Every structure is written in C-alpha cells, then in structure tokens.
Amino acid sequence: MIRTRGLRHIQFLVRDAERSFAFYQRLFGIEEQFRDGSAVFASVPGGGDMITFAGSSDWRPGAHAGLRHFGFAIDPGTDVAAARAEIEAAGGTAIRSGEHEDAKPYIYFTDLDGYEVELYTP
C-alpha cells in the first residue's frame, strides 16, 4: 500500500485559464503560485492544495472525462444562502443545496466551464 496525505492537486482543462482563475479567486481567495505556459497553478490559502487551470483548445463543455464533481470544505456555520448569492454574482450557477447527515449544509454549483463543484461542511 502506498500511504498518501490525501488528494492535493487537480488540473482542469478550461476554455480560458485567466477567466477560471479569476472566478475561483473571487469566490475562495485562491492565490497564484506560479505559471507554466498557459497554465495557472493556484492554492486555497491554508488549504495545502494545488489547483491548476490549463487553457486548452481540447476543452469541450460537458466533456469532463467522467469527473462528476469536486468539493471544497467550508467552515461550520457558513451561510449557504449568502454563498449561493456570491456564486451567482461571480457567474456560477447554483444547482442544489441542502444538508448532509447531522445538519451539515452543502451547495452544488457549476463554474464557468460547466464543472460541478460542491461546498460542504465536513
């Protein structure tokens, strides 16, 4: 068995890396770490992760190679209605929201490239 410390990096093919980076920066305050060609590498402050937005002519709406969604953990007590308003103001589309077990709120939305994203309380 290979021991890991969890999933820490994911790369997305996007229509426009700058546009996608700006969307996530507005919503979550992600910070640019570096660039490599047309790709922007960024991290959520204090998250220990690496998200790459790679501009690609191969990007096609809805063609995400089996990826259903990915998620960001939110702090307990986060106002989901306010988060929904921020998502929509940034150009995202809220899909559904509710509570997982033990009154843990969540919201699903699509980003500017059609990726489905979950905000959830762990």
Image (tube, rainbow, N blue to C red):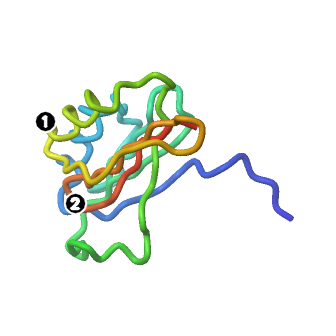
x, y percent for residue 28: 34, 32
Q: Is residue 57 above or below residue 86?
A: below
Viewed as shown, does residue 25 lie left or right of 78? left
Q: What element carries label 1?
A: helix
Circles 2 and 1 in contact, beta carbons < 8 Å: no
Q: Mark 1 points at which residue?
A: 89
Residue positioned most to the top: 77
Quarter holding the C terminus? top right
Q: What residue type is labelled 1?
A: Ala
Viewed as shown, does residue 44 lie left or right of 38? right
Please rate how many residues cluster around mark 1, counting C-alpha atoms within 10 Å: few if below 14, some from 14 to 19, many from 20.
few
Residue positioned most to the right: 1
Residue 114 vs residue 14, the one in the foreground:
114
Q: In this view, does 94 lie above or below 32?
A: below
Q: Is mark 2 on a helix, strand or loop?
A: loop
Residue 68 vs residue 100, the one in the foreground:
100
Quarter holding the N terminus? bottom right
Q: Is residue 4 above or below residue 80?
A: below
Q: In this view, does 57 lie above or below 4?
A: below
- Residue at (40, 77) in percent of width and height: 65
- Residue at (47, 32) in percent of width and height: 74
Please rate how many residues cluster around mark 2, counting C-alpha atoms within 10 Å: few if below 14, some from 14 to 19, many from 20.
some
x, y percent for residue 35: 34, 46
Residue 106 vs residue 56, the one in the foreground:
106
Residue 105 vs residue 10, the one in the foreground:
105
Q: What residue type is labelled 2?
A: Asp
* Disc with the residue nearer the chain's start (2 vs 1): 1
Residue 113 is labelled as 2
Mark 2 or 1: in front is 1
x, y percent for residue 15: 19, 62
